[in-house]
Amino acid sequence: MIKIYGIPNCDTMKKAMKWLDKHKLIYEFHDYKKWGVPESDLEQWVKNAGWEVILNKRSTTWKGLSDKMKKSLNEYSSIRIMLDNPSSIKRPVLVKNKTLIIGFKEDEYKTLL
């Protein structure tokens, strides 16, 4: 089963879900805004991909952090920020079995799905 995490009104999310629909792949959508992100899931993503990959440095949350905080970020503090502000997580996050894909890249989806 494919599970895709993100925000429904995000253009990248829309592209990813449209691609999944077009290829008739069944998936479950997890809305960050409504349900947040389970801490255990986020910790696993960070373990597998690194917090630097998961944290969305284009988000308004990132832009609102002080320069001091940005320079002193580590795994723990970035996880806290992402849990408190799910829109600071890159999207989509797609999970299928042990496969984890951060963001939407059509070629990557084709290869891994």
Image (tube, rainbow, N blue to C red):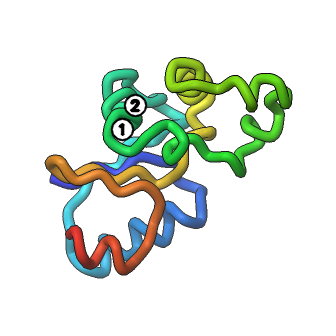
Evaluate if marks 2 and 1 touch, with contact meaning CB atoms under 8 Å apart.
Answer: yes
Q: Mark 1 belongs to which amino acid?
A: Trp
Toward which corner of the image does residue 89 lie, by quadrant? top right
Vertical placement of residue 61 versus 79, above or below: below
Mark 2, secondary structure of its residue: helix
Vertical placement of residue 43 versus 109, above or below: above
- Which label was assigned to residue 97? none
Q: Is residue 73 left or right of residue 17?
A: right
Vertical placement of residue 57 versus 21, above or below: above
The residue labelled by disc 2 is 42
Q: x, y percentage for residue 65?
A: 80, 29
Which residue is at 37% across, 76% downward? 19
- How many C-alpha atoms fall within 10 Å of the one at disc 1: few (<14), some, or many (≥20)? some
Vertical placement of residue 36 versus 113, above or below: above
Which residue is at 38% across, 42% downward? 30
Which residue is at 70% across, 24% downward? 72
Looking at the image, which residue sits at the far front?
71
- In this rendered view, identify the residue nearer to me: 112 or 85: 112
- How many C-alpha atoms fall within 10 Å of the one at disc 2: few (<14), some, or many (≥20)? some
- In this rendered view, identify the residue nearer to me: 79 or 86: 79
Mark 1, secondary structure of its residue: helix
Q: CA distance from mark 2 to mark 1?
A: 5 Å
Q: Mark 2 belongs to which amino acid?
A: Leu
Which residue is at 39% across, 66% downward? 17
- Which label was assigned to residue 45? 1
- In this rendered view, identify the residue nearer to me: 21 or 93: 93
Q: Is residue 64 left or right of residue 78?
A: right
